[in-house]
């Protein structure tokens, strides 16, 4: 999960771990990109310090990565939605997100559920 807001990271980490997911947290896109090994799926905020969520998507594409991306943003606009999906996001969700909606988006994308 990549989000620059510590309360969001902590809350979603608790939810995802309770649902059986292995969770790794990153506060920036650059930190995430430096630690891709072993990651099955990423929940990605768009507005991050330095490297934006869009930049992360483009960097993944440049690496020919097949890593599924679920965008989770607090800044929902038609342009953000369109660009995220055009860049390959498998889902585009808005904060605050319903727990069930997030889990339903993630389950088919990852093998980390126990």
Image: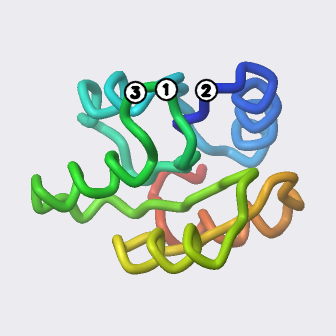
Asked which colour scheme the image uses, the reply is rainbow
Sequence-wise, which precedes: disc 1 or disc 2? Answer: 2
Sequence-wise, which precedes: disc 3 or disc 2? Answer: 2
Residue 68 in which image quadrant: bottom left
Q: Name the residue under label 3.
A: 50
- Residue 110 in the image, given as x and y percentages of width and height: 47, 60
Q: Mark 1 points at which residue?
A: 49
Which residue is located at x 32 percent, y 27 percent? 30
Please rate how many residues cluster around mark 3, counting C-alpha atoms within 10 Å: few if below 14, some from 14 to 19, many from 20: few
Residue 101 in which image quadrant: bottom right
Q: Say whether marks 3 and 1 touch (CB < 8 Å).
A: yes
Residue 37 in which image quadrant: top left
Q: Can you say whether 45 is above or below 14 in the image?
A: below
Which residue is located at x 71 percent, y 43 percent? 16
Q: Residue 4 carries which label?
A: 2
- Residue 47 in the image, given as x and y percentages of width and height: 57, 41
Q: Say whether marks 1 and 2 touch (CB < 8 Å).
A: yes
Q: Can you say whether 89 is above or below 72 in the image?
A: below
Secondary element under disc 1, as helix, strand or loop, is: loop
């Amino acid at each position: 999960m990549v989000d620059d807001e510590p309360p969001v990271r902590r809350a979603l980490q608790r939810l995802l771990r309770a649902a059986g997911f292995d969770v790794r947290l990153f506060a920036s896109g650059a930190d995430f990109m430096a630690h891709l090994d072993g990651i099955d799926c990423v929940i990605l905020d768009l507005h991050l310090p330095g490297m934006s969520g869009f930049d992360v998507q483009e960097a993944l594409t440049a690496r020919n990565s097949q890593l599924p991306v679920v965008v989770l943003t607090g800044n929902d606009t038609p342009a953000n939605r369109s660009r995220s999906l055009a860049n390959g996001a498998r889902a585009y969700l808005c904060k605050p997100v319903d727990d069930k909606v997030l889990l339903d988006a993630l389950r088919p994308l990852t093998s980390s559920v126990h």
